[in-house]
Image (cartoon, rainbow, N blue to C red):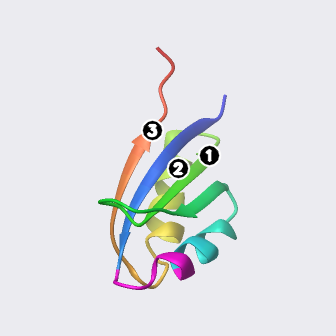
Amino acid sequence: MVVQAYILIQTEVGKAADVAAEIARIKGVTLAEDVTGPYDVIVRAEASNVDDLGRLVVARVQGVPGITRTLTCPVVHI
């Protein structure tokens, strides 16, 4: 079973499009779009387990220049 999550990202001013484009190239990211509102980029990502998802967020996504904050929201099926 695949673990999926939405990652809500705040960026430096004027960096949303660049951040979304770079994140879209990361393996495990299925969608990355710049948006308006309290967050600048919304990402949908997936991994084989929660630990791999955490590594994807911390090691890959948060390493993209221009990101100031992330909030990871795992998808649950109730």
Q: From mark 2 to mark 1, how far is it between C-alphas?
A: 7 Å
Q: Is residue 13 magenta?
A: yes
| Residue at the disc numbered 3 | 74
Measuring 50% from the left and 68% from the top, which residue is drawn there? 61
Q: Residues within 10 Å of mark 1 (few under 14, many from 20)?
A: many
Q: Please say if the residues under marks 1 and 3 sit with CB atoms less than 8 Å apart.
A: no
Kind of residue at badge 3: Pro
Q: Please say if the residues under marks 2 and 1 sit with CB atoms less than 8 Å apart.
A: yes
Kind of residue at badge 2: Leu
- The tag on residue 46 is 1
Q: From mark 2 to mark 3, how far is it between C-alphas?
A: 9 Å
SS class of the residue under badge 2?
A: helix
SS class of the residue under badge 3?
A: strand
Looking at the rendered image, the disc whose residue lies closer to the viewer, 2 or 1, is 1
Quarter of the image for the N terminus: give it: top right
Find the magenta span and give its range: 12-18
Q: Position of residue 71 (x, y in %)?
A: 34, 54
Measuring 54% from the left and 69% from the top, which residue is drawn there? 60
For the residue pair 47 and 30, the one nearer the viewer reads as 30
Compared to residue 43, the image places residue 61 above or below, namely below
| Residue at the disc numbered 2 | 53
Q: Position of residue 13 (x, y in %)?
A: 34, 84
Quadrant for residue 31, please give it.
Answer: bottom right
Task: Please give left or right for residue 64 compared with residue 32 in the image.
Answer: left
- The tag on residue 60 is none
